[in-house]
Amino acid sequence: MSHGNAGPAGGAMATLRKGDHVPEVARLQQLLKDRGFQVAVDGEFGLKTKQAVQAFQSQDVDPHGEPLIVDGIAGPLTWWSLTHAKSSIVPASAVDYALMPQVESGGSQNGRRALGVAIDEMKAGAGEIGGNNRGPYVVKYLNGLAPEGSSWCAAFVSWCFAQDPTGIPFRYTVGARDLLSQLKKRGWAREPGAGYQPEPGDIVIWWRVRADGWQGHTGLVHQVRDGRLYTVEGNRLPQVRGFSYVLSRIDKRLGYGHVPD
């Protein structure tokens, strides 16, 4: 049976979760498949469908440009995001992401140079072209380490640091958790909740789906202002974009990385 909201006859899609077997499940599966997620359209909300929903939620946003909650439940916000193109959503912000933060706001030279590269890519309209996780920008960021169609958030961060004439200060990677592991080994990681104030050009890393899993997401810190964290990220939306979060309410953080000079 279905849960939550009324079905299509009531003007809204039903809230669906693992174990449901109703006609709306097939539509959900088809929408996920259309977005490039590997799921059978069989009308059965099983484990693979839940995992596909979680994967979708981990890289999409709601009508206000805020990241979706990754819970594997297809509720109203998830349905909205599945039926609206990500590229039509422009998150509102109190800062101009196209401008580098003032020097007084901190950040290492390495981090600020990477942030400057990210800002230039954002201004150039960099992002997906021709489908989910596809196009020349994505291929450029993946750098031959993963096939086109792969998640590219960590590849984007790596590419930004790799544009420094002195070279990338860590091993180029397409994995957010691998990036965090490298930062920890170098003593450059900062634990969430440890009182660390992130600075421009720092790396922020989140877990996706499960805290003890293998999936993650990452981006670059633009600045912290008035209790909010501002970032520049790839693979949250099709284009490289800026995002803002209430600093005290950010969940799923695995930590920050501060690459020194």
Image (cartoon, rainbow, N blue to C red):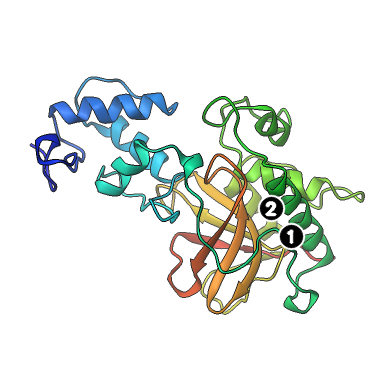
Q: Nearer the viewer, residue 238 or 250?
A: 238
Q: Position of residue 222 (x, y in %)?
A: 66, 64
Amino acid type assigned to the residue bearing label 2 in the image: Gln
- Return the residue at label 1: 186
Q: Residue at x 72, y 43 (%)?
A: 124
- Answer whether residue 171 is visible to the viewer in this image: no
- Return the residue at label 2: 182
Q: Position of residue 178 (x, y in %)?
A: 62, 47
Splitting the image into 4 quarters, where does residue 235 fall? Answer: top right
Splitting the image into 4 quarters, where does residue 153 fall? Answer: top right
Task: Kindly check if marks 2 and 1 are in contact, taking CB atoms under 8 A apart as contact.
Answer: yes
Instruction: Using the numbered discs, state the Cα–Cα distance from disc 2 to disc 1 in whole angstroms.
Output: 6 Å
Amino acid type assigned to the residue bearing label 1 in the image: Arg
Q: Nearer the viewer, residue 257 or 61?
A: 61
Relative placement, left or right, of 36 versus 104 is: left
- For mark 2, give the secondary structure: helix
Q: Residue at x 63, y 53 (%)?
A: 181
- Answer whether residue 5 is visible to the viewer in this image: yes
